[in-house]
Amino acid sequence: MILDLLRHGETEQGGLRGSLDDALTEKGWAQMRDAVAEAGPWQVLVSSPLQRCARFADELGARLHLPVQREAGLQELHFGDWEGRSAAQIMEDQADALGRFWSDPYACTPPNGEPVEAFAERVLAGVERLGQQHAGKRVLLVTHGGVMRLLLARARGMPREHLLQVEVAHGALVRLVLRDDGQWAEAH
């Protein structure tokens, strides 16, 4: 299976969005349209159910005459009390906790947030389901920065505490290939 990962574009609100269901800006729509303009073809379209992913996936699916499969397991990490806040805002009153989160997100969960270990299990189970459902196909997954960081860090063999060192821009499109040994590899 070939799995192309597309991060949603810029959203109307800044900060950590997590489970917040924000719309894309015009720039966000353009970022995503530009990313897929010369890419594909895909046989399957899958999307996070959050509108910043799903609305673009629906537009692309209509253009390509493909149904869009929603996959709740591939939503962004829930940042708890940090949702909707920028890093600068969090630094004002929780600088130590934010620093611990950035240096090892598995060891520090945002207050009332989803533990990264649970997030990783949820995402990996979702991707495994896709692999079983769509073996041998080219799949486009419209998703979030955290999901992409997790999958890219694993494909690159990075230590898990380095998860947040993986750069994923708005509208980024990257390809993973499922190898015969069941591991994901980044394709260039």
Image (tube, rainbow, N blue to C red):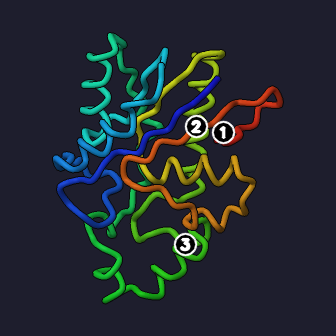
- Residue 74 placement, left or right of 2: left
Residue furthest top in the image: 65
User: Which residue is drawn at the image coordinates 53% and 42% (left, top)?
Assistant: 174
CB contact under 8 Å: marks 1 and 2: yes
Please tell me which residue is depicted at 16% across the width and 47% down the height of the picture: 26
- Position of residue 1 relative to residue 85, above or below, is above
Inspect the image, locate mark 1, and give the three-letter code of the amino acid beneath it.
Ala
Residue type beneath disc 2: Arg
Of the residues shown, which amino acid type is indicated by label 3?
A: Cys
Q: Are marks 2 and 3 in contact (CB under 8 Å)?
A: no
Q: Which residue is mark 2?
A: 175
Decide: few, some or many residues near mark 3? Use Cα within 10 Å; few <14, some 14-19, many ≥20.
some
Q: Nearer the viewer, mark 1 or mark 3?
A: 1
Residue 114 is left or right of residue 1, and the answer is: left
CA distance separating discs 1 and 3: 31 Å
Label disc, if present, on residue 108 of the rendered structure? 3
Residue 41 on image: x %, y %: 47, 19
96 shown above or below 186: below
Q: At x 27% / y 71%, what residue is drawn? A: 85
Distance between the alpha carbons at the discs numbered 2 and 3 = 29 Å
Query: Which badge, 1 or 3, comes first in the chain's sequence?
Result: 3
Could you say whether the residue bearing mark 2 is in a helix, strand or loop? strand
Among the two numbered marks 1 and 2 on one chain, the one whose residue lies closer to the N terminus: 2
Is residue 120 toward the left or the right of residue 25 in the image?
A: right
Residue that badge 1 annotates: 187
Q: CA distance from mark 1 to mark 2?
A: 5 Å
Q: Which mark is residue 125?
A: none
Q: Residue 104: image x %, image y %?
A: 61, 72
